Amino acid sequence: MRVVVIGSGVAGTMAALAARKTGAEVIAVAGRPGASAQWSGVVELFGPSNEPPPIENLLGRSRQPEAHRPPGIAPGDRFERLMDRRRFHPYARVGLGFEAVAGHFQEALELADLEIVASLSPACLANAHGLLRLADGCASSLRPGLLPLAGSTRDLTVWGFSHYPAFDPEVVANQLQHQGLAAEARWIDLPDAPLCQSVATAATVLEGMAADRLEEIGRSIAEGTGERVALVPPILGRTMRSHRSIRDGLTQKGERADLAELASVHNSLHGFRLIWELQAALEAAGVAVRQASVQAFSANDRRIASVTLDSGERLTGDAFVLATGRAMAGGFQRSEPFTETLFGLPLYLDGMPLDPLQRDSATLVSRSLVDDHPLFRVGVGVNQRLQPLDVDLGVAFDNLFSAGGLLAGTHFALDGSAFGVALVTGLLAGRTAVEAEVTPWV
Ligand SMILES: Cc1cc2nc3c(=O)[nH]c(=O)nc-3n(C[C@H](O)[C@H](O)[C@H](O)COP(=O)(O)OP(=O)(O)OC[C@H]3O[C@@H](n4cnc5c(N)ncnc54)[C@H](O)[C@@H]3O)c2cc1C
């Protein structure tokens, strides 16, 4: 049996790994990096803490930061509220309850061997603007910075690096103080390092440092931090490999466990490292990867027979998984006919296909920036088996399955579950694609 997975962000990678685990031959077609490459390092899984959600916080424009500290609502309660508010959420479409989501999340992390940790009790993390974000999990480099939502927390020292002046530890410490935390700011002076404008170039400078220089910096951080937790900008390496070696230097091979990167706000190296990890997981599992874009497909009746890549290669398969993300990754058309890009699938809103009259911006976009714009909940409609639906609410193709950010029913920025949806539906789509061929649904 051969499964072809289109897209290799979080969702596509999970689908490929899950299908591969059943013994199927799997080919993943990896287009250019999409949303997963911009991931901030924070895992959102069970829903947001606030109603309405703190959009100013997400945008980094909070004028009253103390009002946006996430309240300590238990994950199970957040999940219930999310399901009440979003009846067509992908978790609900596939019939998952809280325990199932939590279980599939752990399963997915183990299957991909991702350096991501789950936070078992309600917790939050600071980002590089000093704003606190609710976290159901995080990249492992953020873990020592996980703070409980209620009760006492450890004091924090925010470190800036002189070669990366765009990150100002004073501003970040100030924001954290506004949110009730004890935070102070310190600088590491690197007079010989070239000034860097971006996280990537700032990381390159650290990557080029000798181990003893990193250890020296690590000692300065340790002395200046004392019993506090040291928070640093997310610039410790572009890949997981370089990150580990910088981190080893700064923490004396892990002896100091209380140094954490902050979550990213844009141009995220957490996302960049994640993309490398996903690729490595595909290779380790024996998934064949094509760095290409799918341009066309052929079908017989309601079955996809093959897809054709921009290289001209034609890939036949028994089942296909569509994990092409939202508009920024190429999954949707940004303009008329405003459908899914590859198979021309209709886009759904609130359980129904969008009709042409609904597609104007007045219906899909609210007047205020901070409103809950329906446009962001638009996506591919699926049934319980994650099979995309056609305009008549029927299955579009019997052997096509779908996962991740392109699914309808959830607002990727406001619903506090985007990364979880990609991981969990990816896992289920890959598995279901294989099972459906063995046990067709009647
Ligand atoms: C700036 C930003 C910050 C975020 N921060 C968080 C966060 O803090 N917490 C959280 O939970 N979530 C966050 N998310 C959301 C989360 O990262 C995404 O929901 C998730 O990564 C989506 O994964 P995906 O695999 O569905 O899509 P993508 O990662 O977009 O992958 C889709 C892939 O499909 C490929 N593709 C498209 N068309 C084709 C084609 N024709 N042929 C071949 N390949 C194709 C694309 O090239 C792309 O690689 C953030 C997203 C963004 C953009």
Image (cartoon, rainbow, N blue to C red):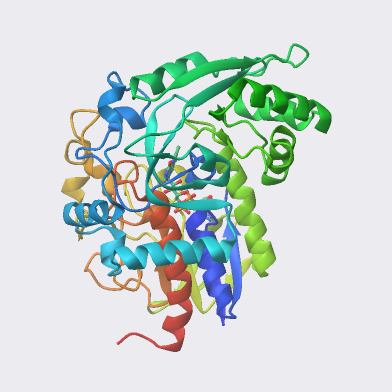
Residue sitting nearer the eye, 223 or 108: 223
Residue lying at 58% horizontally and 41% vertically, measured from the top left: 141
Q: Position of residue 370 (x, y in %)?
A: 24, 30
Residue 269 figure quarter:
top right
Asked if 281 appears above or below 438 in the picture, the reply is above
- Is 43 situated left or right of 309 in this image? left
Q: Is residue 210 visible?
A: no
Which quadrant does the C terminus fall into? bottom left
Q: Is residue 105 visible?
A: yes
Taking the view exactly as shown, the residue that stands out farthest to the top is 191
Residue 289 figure quarter:
bottom right
Taking the view exactly as shown, the residue that stands out farthest to the front is 227
Asked if 117 appears above or below 94 in the picture, the reply is above
Residue sitting nearer the eye, 158 or 368: 158
Q: Position of residue 368 (x, y in %)?
A: 20, 28
Residue lying at 68% horizontally and 36% vertically, measured from the top left: 237
Residue lying at 33% horizontally and 71% vertically, measured from the top left: 396
Q: Position of residue 240 (x, y in %)?
A: 67, 45
Residue 22 figure quarter:
bottom right
Residue sitting nearer the eye, 261 or 430: 261
Q: Position of residue 111 (x, y in %)?
A: 56, 66
Q: How many marks?
A: 0
